[in-house]
Image: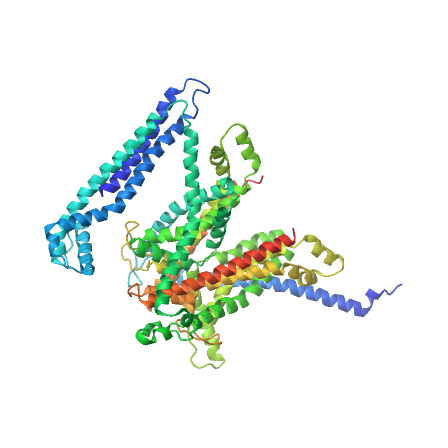
Amino acid sequence: MILTGVLLAVLGLGLVGWFAARGRARLLHTGRGSLQSMPVYHGWHMLLWILVPALIAWGAWMAIMPGLVDGAVMADPAAAQLPADSMSRASILAEAKALADNPGQAAFNPLSQSLSEPVRAAHQRFGLIGAVLVLIVAFAGGGWAFTKVRANFPARSRVERAVMVVLLLASLMAILTTFGIVGSLVFEAGLFFKDVSPIAFLTGTHWAPGNARGANLQDSFGAVPLFWGTIYIGAIIAMIVAIPLGLMSAIYLTQYATSNVRKWLKPMLEILAGIPTVVYGYFAALTVAPIFRDFAAAIGMANPSTESALAAGVVMGVMIIPFVSSMADDALAAVPRAMSDGSLALGATKSETIKKVLLPAALPGIVAGVMLAISRAIGETMIVVMAAGAAANLSLNPFASMTTVTYQIVQMLTGDQEFNSPKTLSAFALGLVLFIVTLVLNIIALRVVKRFREAYE
Amino acid sequence: MSNARWQTPEAARRIARRNAAERRFKLIGLGAIALSLAFLALLLVIMLKNGLSGLSWTFLTGSDSTDPSVAGVWGATKGSLLTMLVTLLLSFPMGVLAAVYLEEFAPRARWIEWIEVSINNLAAVPSIIFGLLGLAVFINTIGMPRSSPLVGGLTLALMTMPVIVISGRNAIKAVPPSIRDAALAVGASKVQTVFHHVLPLALPGILTGTIIGMARALGETAPLLMIGMRAFVVTPPGGITDPASVLPMQIFLWSDEINSGFIRNTSAAIIVLLVFLLAMNGLAIYLRNKFEVRW
């Protein structure tokens, strides 16, 4: 607790330093050009010298303090009774720490009760030492910066250098996130592939992680039905809905609608993209799925399930319409005006021009847009979780319940099982496959779009 | 030449056929839009029909419960607000600073290209992957509290940041070079030029992009499912480290309930969520119209 307080103290100190350095620099001001930097930059320079070293010291202390506390607790006479094996030792220590934070709690293990007092004492002692240390660093930094407040000191360029470092760090966050994703997926998937061979995972057709143990571990993680369900729902059914509707609305909006109509219709269409997927999922499960089920029953299918690939795919397709529409819109707009003018001048009607000239010319852009739409559809989670079902079915029947990669990731990770079982780890292997597929689709699509634009420029 | 070839009955028929095809094509286009909008209208009408009767003071101020008649959304709304607060505080400064760096200062180098590629790709990575990242890094490696708005906000911040960077770069790019030249000409440094002149002019555009990114984060469910924000929370969370639920998650949890009273609650919660999203998007459009400058 004291370490949180010291952070506030350092912030306050920084504020005081800002005013002090600025005030002192103002006193140095004797006329035009007498100061190399404006007083406010001296203030920022001081603030930086107080905050940055103190924060580094604080972070370092937070990192080493648990070790120091553990060492002090181990030295306590009560620790001599701790069991030898590290597992139960760690659990007792963890309980003692929880008790130290919150003394009213009942102890599960009497040993941790007797250890909680030393833990609290060590916490207090090392917290105090750390706080003093951080304050010393802050004062040292501030003092050093204060001596630098001189008329010819280039405070501005120093501060600007610090600004550049901050900017750079912010942009490196993106790379760090990418590395974080790749790193964690590859690491956890690697643990999974130690138990199940990648070939069995990628080519097996039997998915039953529920009873996966011992000898049949290899045969229970065949992900092909999942891949099929994902492709069937996301890349086939959803696209059958989204491509014609999206493309035709783009054609109408760009070629036929007057600018007034377009101004109203386009935002309304885009509302479809702004509705949260969980709402679509609920709509699919509540309204769309029963309609398809009744339809399936009407055409004579024996006990159709409520959850169907068709319901999830159709709703997903509707969700994707604005996306396809805006991609097609861009592609059509990139086709040079002279091409359609030429066709119209030869006597072709507008629809003939669109079908025979505009669409073929815009095709690469449209295909790229469809690829991006597919990559979005196969990564979509909530609709399939709520409407597609859990059964790993390798079937062509759209009324059957089908499962997808994203559904299984959710399924594997939301139960209460220990973290390192093959079952939970399989979610990361599925995530890795999903990540790679969407990445490849995106890279190809972006490249096609780029080349397509260049062709007409 | 009283009877030119294009005036024969046959030619007239052909032209009529082509004109009919033209009208048909136009109608198909209009029909596509009408069908999409009809779907939207159907969705909204069904939610309103099921949910409007559920909107009451107890619903808006209550928390989750096993009894549908006393269950409410305030707990989830507060969780959403806390999560969005964490997301905004992290992703907005980070995104704006990264956009400034990439647009104004970055040297033309190989590793800058890597940053740009990774930002563009992150914007297209499925949201559930960010959930896996949050689970593996924030919860299992760093050991932050599960189900808390802190972890949820961090995860969503990583997801929102690329959106803010991309819209921020476009907004900064739209500021004409003459502004920069003028500031530099009277002796401002490059950093002063950017922070005193370019950024304030680009801010409305950046804010619009930020609000749209936040609206997307507010409706997001899948990554939060990964980090366990599906706790059954009877009391609203007191801070960013308490277990919490968020509005879309509450919708998801209620949609799974067997008790039919929850259909009304789910629809009512959807109305609340959509009202929030509508307000945010409306604000974004208002900002864009009010402050947009055409150079």
- Residue found at x 27% / y 57%: B234
* On screen, residue B225 above or below A224: above
* On screen, residue A259 above or below A9: below
- Left or right: A71 in relation to B54: left
x, y percent for residue A270: 52, 56
- Residue found at x 75% / y 57%: A345
How many dots with numbers? 0
- Left or right: B203 in relation to B5: left
* On screen, residue B233 above or below B16: above
* On screen, residue A190 above or below B181: below
x, y percent for residue A322: 53, 58
x, y percent for residue A406: 41, 65
Report if residue B268 is visible in the image: no
Q: Between B241 and A231, which is closer to the camera in this rendering?
A: A231
In this view, the residue farthest toward the right is B1
Viewport quadrant of the N terminus of chain B: bottom right
